[in-house]
Image (tube, coloured by chain):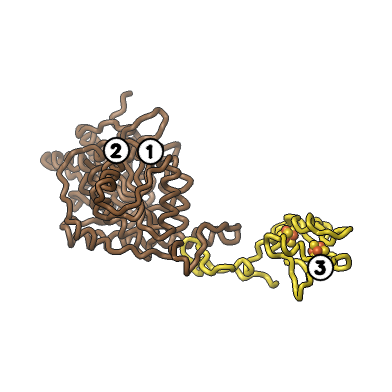
Amino acid sequence: MGDDAIAEAMRQINPHVVAAYPITPSTQVVEAFARFVADGLVDTEFVATESEHSAMSACVGAAAGGGRVMTVTGSQGLAYMFEVLGVASGLRLPLVMAIANRALNSPLNIHGDHSDTMAMRDMGWIHLYSENCQEAYDNTIQAFRIAENPNVRTPVLVAIDGFQTSHMVETLIVEPDKLVKKFIGEHIPSYPMLDIDNPVLYGAADRPDYYMEHKRSQLVGIINAPEVITQIGKEYGDLTGRYYGLVEEYRMEDTEYAIVVMSATAGSVKGAIDQLREEGIAAGLLKIRAFRPFPADEVAKSLSRTKSVAVLDRCGTGGAQGGPLFLEVRTALYEEKSPPQVINYIYGLGGKDLPLKHIKDVYLRLREIARTGERGKLVDFLNLRE
Amino acid sequence: MKKEKLKKWQELPIGGLILDMGNSSETQTGDWNPNRLVWNEDTCTHCLLCWINCPDASIKVEDSKVIGIDNYHCKVCGICVEVCPTKPKSLEIISEEVA
Ligand code: SF4
Ligand code: SF4
């Protein structure tokens, strides 16, 4: 299961501190990791907090202290952490947080969608989205390298789809403990508070004369991140054979119609593409792995060759002009000389299924848009009863 | 104290950290207050109760004698006024508009 894949990566990483409050569908990560702690397989100080707000607060403290730190949450738990998320990124703490994406209340729903992490998309964290258990494992390991890189020093979240990945049983290649240990290396803290010979102050107040300057300085980590994510993805690939970049292209070389999507649904889209290719339809996929910082150049380059594009958002619009991924993609294409037509579908909210038939229908509509030039409805829902 | 020189964003330590301890004397932390503390040299007995009780080290003392107020750091909390034993008090809070 995806949750176990993350827990297994955590066992190998052996963080100094894990502070967490379990929440469905990531409970299994915390349970499995607590077992590792009880069995003495890790040296981690495991803090079972009374809430997610406390969990993130404990992580901030532990990371400022100089530790390698991780937490796990999703949905309401992530929402409850909100206040402290900006503290972590503002203080440039190299935390890693695994998220099993889950819908936000109301109505209460424990199933997968991206509204939780999309709500924190501008909190200054790096976002990595995983398609399956293997990517969940691989991303968790790479996340530490990215977060702790001296040019980045920014918290990273690794997201998997709640249930579709968190509870999906599939084959997982677990790298040898030694290899993972060597890959992530020793944690070299920057200005650790526990270095009492060199005292520093964390969390000072700013008046208007400095706040904006500090926010600009914070951005440096995010600006440096794409290069580091790419380089670490390659280094990891050289070791394991599984390469990672900011985006992943699937059959995009000669694509006319492309879907842009993140996480588990990318797997279904690949299946639909293979079937459509048999029928002679030049379908392709652009999967976004790093949503923050948004890889605008890669997206523009990849999609500029296509005729029509559908962006699938697993998150509502909340009154915006479309889903969050759609807004990014469409903006990325604005500078293109002859950009493709771009439409947006909201799908899979609260764990709603997305059968292949619907994905194929999207491609057929994209073909129709390319043929007629008629874009039709800009934002629509997929697999909605109406 | 002359006007503090503001740093550019490139000059700031990572994460808004403060790396050098005891540097609040370099930053004008008290210049926002619309009220101001004034000291009356004529009635002051230099008992230094104000100096002992000030939480912001803003009573300036030299050779065991009060020489003035550091208005760039004084928060006008009034503690020193409270403890000053002279009658009338040798410390007074006035409104900046009056001053
Ligand atoms: S407490 Fe009053 S009298 Fe004593 S030193 Fe301060 S100002 Fe002067
Ligand atoms: S008003 Fe408060 S801060 Fe100012 S000198 Fe008096 S005790 Fe210190």
Determine whether A40 is above or below A372 in the image: below
Contact? badges 2 and 1 (CB < 8 Å): yes
Contact? badges 3 and 2 (CB < 8 Å): no
Between B46 and A171, which is closer to the camera in this rendering? B46
Of the four image quadrants, the one with ligand 2 is: bottom right
Mark sitting on residue B46: 3
Contact? badges 3 and 1 (CB < 8 Å): no
In the rendered image, the residue lying farthest to the bottom is B63
- For disc 1, the neighbor class at 10 Å (few under 14, some 14 to 19, many from 20) is many
Does the closest atom of ligand 2 sit within 8 Å of the Cβ of label 2?
no
Q: Is A5 placed left or right of B50 in the picture?
A: left
Q: Quadrant of the C terminus of chain A?
A: top left
Residue linked to disc 2:
A162
Disc 3 is attached to a residue of which chain?
B
Amino acid type assigned to the residue bearing label 3 in the image:
His
Chain letter for the part of the structure drawn in brown:
A
Residue linked to disc 1:
A75
Q: Quadrant of residue A277?
A: top left
Does the closest atom of ligand 1 sit within 8 Å of the Cβ of label 3?
yes
